[in-house]
Structures are given as C-alpha cells and as structure tokens.
Image (spheres, rainbow, N blue to C red):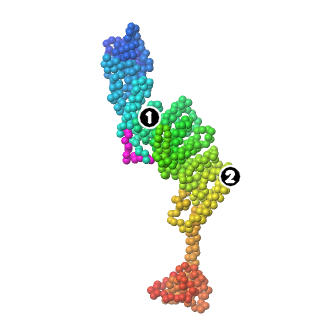
Amino acid sequence: MENPFDNPAMKRTSDWILSQEFPSDITIQVGDATFNLHKLRLASRCGYIRKLVSGINGFKVTHIDITGMPGGARAFELVTKFCYGENLEITEDNVAMLRCAAEHLEMTDESKGASLVGTTEAYLEAVALTSLAGAVTVLRKSEELIPVAEEVDLVGRSIDAIAHITCHDSQFTMPLGSTAGSYNGVKVWKAVDDWWADELTSLRIDTFQRVVIAMKARGFKGIALGTLIMLYAQKSLRRLNMHRRDKKMDPRQEHEKRVVLETIVSLLPKEKNSTSVSFLSMLLRAALHLDTTLACRLDLEKRMAAQLGQAVLDDLLIPSYSPEAGTTFDVDAVQRILAGYLEHEGEATRLDYNTDDDFISTASPLNDVGMVGKLMEAYLAEIASDMNLPIDKFTDLAEMIPERARFNEDGMYRAIDIYLKAHPHLSEAERRKVCKAMDCQRLSREACAHAAQNDRLPVQTVVQVLYHEQRRLREAPAHPPSGASSFSGESPAPSLPYKPAQSLMGRHARGGAAQDELSRLQRENEELKMEVMRLKMRLRDPSALPPAGGAPPPSGRPPPPKKPGGGGFMNNVSKKLGRLNPFLRHDAMDGGKVRTKPPKDRRHSIGW
C-alpha cells in the first residue's frame, strides 16, 4: 500500500498531521503536491475551502484542486500550519507569499482568531516595509506573485517604501562633503550601497522603472541615481556582443534587450555629469547594435554632446552597424554629436532640463573648446586610414571643427596626411579639396618643414606653405625675446610624430631671427681670427717687438718708430690688419705718429 506521506510536502507536515485525533477526510492538490488534511480545520480558516465543502453536498467533497495558488505547494504548506494552529514564523522572505496566498484562499475571517490576512498585514506595516532591506526583499518576492501582488498593492507599497527611505534617510542622500568633493561643479552624492543596489538591479525592467520614477518623484537624483542605472544596464546588457556586425541572437531575446535599453535611456538623470561619457557611449553602441528607436539614439547623442569635453578618443570610436555605410566607424553619429556640442557651446547657464522633455544645454568650461578640438583632430587621424571613408565625410567633419578650438593646424595636417597616404589614387582636384580643410598660415615650423617635402600634397598647397613660411621669416624680429614662441606669439607647438629632413629643418626651424644671429656670430668669429693673425705676425717681425727692458705699448697705442727700411712690408701688412681690430682707438689709426708714454706700473706683457 502506498504511503500517503511519500510526497515531499506531506513529509514536512507529517508529524503534526499524524498527531491529529481524527483521520484525514479531504485531499488537496496543489500543483504536483498532494495534501491529506481535515475539512474542519481548513474550512474554519479558509473561506475559499469553506464554500466548497459547505452545503448539502459538501460532505461528498473529498478532493480539491487549488489551481493558480500563489507560492505553490510551499505557500500552502505554511497556510496549513496556520490553519492547524501550529507555530508559523513569518519573515521578510515569506510574508509576500503568505499575504497573496491568504488573499487567494480568502483567509479574512477573524471569528476563529486572527486571520492570516490581518497577521501578514500587521507584519508588513510594522516590520517588512520599515527598512530598505525588507522593502526591497518584499518587492523582489512580489514580482513572482503578480497579479495577486498587484491586487493587494504589495508592489506599490514596497516601491513607495523604497523611495521614501532612500530619499529621506541621510544614509543614502547626504553629500559626501570633503571626502568626495565635486565632479565638474556638481555635488557628488553618496554612492549607492552595493547590497541594496544589487537587489534592485535584479528586478524586472518594468518594476525597476517604477522604482526609479518613484525615487525621482521623491527627489532622489544625481550621481547616485546615475550609478544605480549604470549598474542595472551593465547587468542586463552584459551578454550583448557589440563587437560583431552580424547579430547571432534569438529574435525574442533581441527584442527583450531592446526594450530594456530603451527603458534605461528614458530613465537617465537629466542632470549633467550624473553619468559618464564612456557609459553613454556604451549605451549608444548598444542602441545602434539593437536598432532601437531613432528618439533613443538621438537622446544619447545629445547627452554625449553636452559632455563632449570629458570624452576620450575611445568614446567616439563607435562601430558602424549599417551595411550601407561601408565605413568602419559611425562618422555620422560623431558629426551629430559635434554639431550638438557647437550648438550649445556658447550658452552660459548650467546643463539642465527646464521641463520633463525639453533639453537645455550650457556653455562648457573655457578649456573644453580646445580639448574638443584636439579630440576631434585625433578622431580624424584615426578614421583617416579607412579605405572606404569618402572625401565628403572626411572634409565635412574637418570643416566643422571651429578655428577657436584648434591651437594650430598641425593636428589637421597630420589627419590629412594620413588620409592622403591611405587613398593614393586621388586626383589632384580631390587632394586639393581635402587640403582645403587646413589653414597653411597656422602650421608650425616643424609642420611646414615636413609639408614642403611631402609628395602627397598637391602642388598648390606646397606653394602656399612655402609662401607663408617665407613671409613669416621676413616678418620675424631680428632679436626675439627669450622663450619666444615659434608660432604667432603662442607657446611652442608640439612636434609631429614624424621628423622632416635635416636640411629643411635647419632652414625653417631656426627662422629669420636665428639666421641673423648666426650671421652676426660668423662676422665676429672672422674678426677674431684676423686679430689673432695680426698678433702672430707682430711676434714674428723683430721690428715689431718692443725694445729690451721696455714695455709693450698700451692698448690702442701705435708701435715705436721703426728703423728705416726695416720690416717695411710686414709693418704695412700689420697696419692694414690692425684696422680690423675693434679695440683700437681712433687716434691710433693715423699711421703710428701719435705716441703716448706708458704708465710706470704697467706689467711687461704682450697684448692689447
């Protein structure tokens, strides 16, 4: 004979069922589990079962199948304990299940004692929904009990409790103060704790959306909210391989990912700097990969434009998933991002939203413009090597970079040179079109030296480079001040990654001022050489030496009278060379007729 307690659910309740005075008279089927119980015990507490076993034919009912039981066999086992008066421990993990099971079985009658509905409600109000951990746990358990959990408002009350606690408890909303400071002028809020953030990020996307909306309504915003959304996005999109152009994903799973991503984008905080540019770039890549709505992608591009000054090159290297584009990277998206940045770059107010839908950008910090210019030049150099990049896309993006955002044209010249090298079959007219994006007057000396010998540049561009360099050399001051700039009074331009030929570098890098200085030094060097030669000739000529015991003439004095006919030729040569001596006095240039008496204390030495 089959043991009635072979069922796992009945084994857990066998001890107190067997202790009953009367044998069981009804069998309850809950899913795969079977419970042999007593009608009287169940009917006294469960209105649902009481209706089935009451009446004229109630004594004939021996089997009941409870379909759609919230919580299944585990919940009914706990309900059975409550009906039999056994000790029932209510916890944060099972209170949601018990509350829904009590609602389904209509356990509201308090005539026989406390009802299960009243008992669970009291626990929810006094214990479970008063702490963040309890509210999050109840919400997570309630997701498995919908729609009954919605009927008893378990989901709504749990969400309200989470929003109230997170927005009014200083543990979650107080600023970090001196330990964290601020991030780009925005006060940093205390980061979300891992333990409850992990619980919230395990919610379904629709439930998570309701939680975030409730938290926003209560005033929870800024970095903490952005961090929470970022954690949820990383968990939900971590299996999405965005490096593959071909989508090897189940259509149903792809649809679910698309819904999650679009919902996450709609929940992003409206405050500037609440999320990083890298995170926004990751969302944009996922949006392009999953082919989300146009509004979703444009929203991400607008947010990236507002924080473009904080971006790095990798943030802009967004793969192109469109087979029609043909290029490796999505240049159109970056062009729209730059256009959005330039559109709001001059505004003076801080980034914010004036309504729920209208986006108000602000002027970026003063150093943002130069940083964005360098970033876009680096991006141009990165995409320039793409063989499939059309000329129009390259030049359109290059011409969008404003002149005030470029320190000089070296970065633009580098990108153009890479593009011309990667596209060697361009015609002369096409190369001229590419080079129009560069202002030859703003190239540094190093770039001019390289461009002058660059065979890839069109002849017209090379002529312009040489013309502007020659004009700059003519206009350069003869004696530039110490630390003078090599370009237009600004700080020296950074060197290019390639080095020009030595001859051209020497001619152009030194400039007109350096050449003047070199000529002056060469003249002085020649004069010194001539003076040394003159002194050697005087030493070799005996007539040019002073008499014994005497002293040589002082500096600027003519030599003593020579003997007639003695050393005349050498003496004449010495006189001519002496005129080159810059230290001679004017009164000594009369052929040696002026003589002065040397001082008595002068040392006996040879010199001037």
Front tag of 2 and 1 = 1
Q: How far across and how far down the image is residue 459, in percent?
A: 67, 56
* Residue 166 versus residue 45 in the image, above or below: below
Residue 213 numbered tag: 1
Residue that carries the numbered disc 2 in the rendered image: 428
Residue 512 colored magenta?
no
Left or right of residue 152: residue 554: right
Q: How far across and how far down the image is residue 236, in percent?
A: 48, 34
The front one of 604 and 338 is: 338
Name the residue rendered at 62%, 63% in the picture. Answer: 470
Residue type, numbered disc 2: Glu
* Residue 587 versus residue 264 in the image, above or below: below
Residue 368 numbered tag: none
Instruction: Report the magenta residues as a range.
Output: 171-184
Q: How far across and how far down the image is residue 167, in percent?
A: 38, 37
* Residue 94 versus residue 301 in the image, above or below: above
Residue 335 visible at all: yes
Question: Which is nearer the N-term, disc 2 or disc 1?
Answer: 1
Using the numbered discs, state the Cα–Cα distance from disc 2 to disc 1 in whole angstroms. Answer: 59 Å
